[in-house]
Image (tube, rainbow, N blue to C red):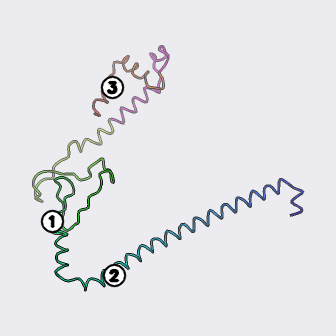
Amino acid sequence: YDMLMDYPALMFAIFVYVITTIIFMLNLLIAQLNCSYQATYQDMLGFARLNRGKIVAETMPSVPKGRWERFIGQLRLDDRVEFGEGDIGLAGGVQVFEPAAANITTVDMIRRFGGSTSQMAQWPEEEGGQNDEEDRFDRMEKLIEKAMKRLVPTKGSRKKGGGSSTGQGSSDQAEETGEHDDSAGSQA
């Protein structure tokens, strides 16, 4: 240590190394403690559920049969559970209401088709399902063409001072060449 006092730059580098190492090791210790706490918490939840199940299993023989039958009847497990307004689902469930903002869904994932449920009936075709990929490629082609027109300078655009970065110059170019942008109307 006495020899390091003669070399202040070396002593500074060693102090920085030691402090960095201590901080890294403390962070590593915190991460390990956090992981072990999470594992212990999951085990605690599992043991609590097992203990509750054991209590229920021990209590069931002492419940009178008539009381148990009334409880099962109040659950109405034979009635179908309504998923949404007019959407009757399966029987055997318990319906729990939740606020509409709890799980927001913007797209309905269930597709409904009216008509017979017979296996022999033909499945209804989706509206525009086959041309969807072709429409995507057409839109991509139009976007690429617009981008190329903006990148490649034309004779008319240099006279007017060139196109701006806001895209105002591209509408001037489309008017000069007689092209009209109808992609906005087709996307709506």
Residue 89 falls in image quadrant: bottom left
Label 2 to label 1: alpha-carbon separation: 29 Å
Q: Nearer the viewer, residue 74 or 166?
A: 74
Q: Is residue 151 above or below residue 24?
A: above
Quick check: 125 left or right of 156?
left
For residue 55, which numbered disc appears in the image? 2
User: What label sits on residue 79 in the rendered view?
Assistant: 1
Q: Is the Cβ of the residue at disc 2 closer than 8 Å to that at disc 1?
A: no
Give the residue type at disc 1.
Answer: Asp
Tell which tag, 2 or 1, sits nearer the viewer.
2
Residue 160, image x, y percentages: 47, 14
Q: Report the quarter where the C terminus lies.
A: top left
Q: Is residue 56 magenta?
A: no
Q: Is residue 146 magenta?
A: yes
Q: Which residues are magenta?
A: 139-163
Which is nearer the N-term, disc 2 or disc 1?
2
Q: Which residue is mark 3?
A: 181
Q: Residue at x 26, y 61 (%)?
A: 96
Q: Quadrant of residue 88?
A: bottom left
Number of numbered discs present?
3
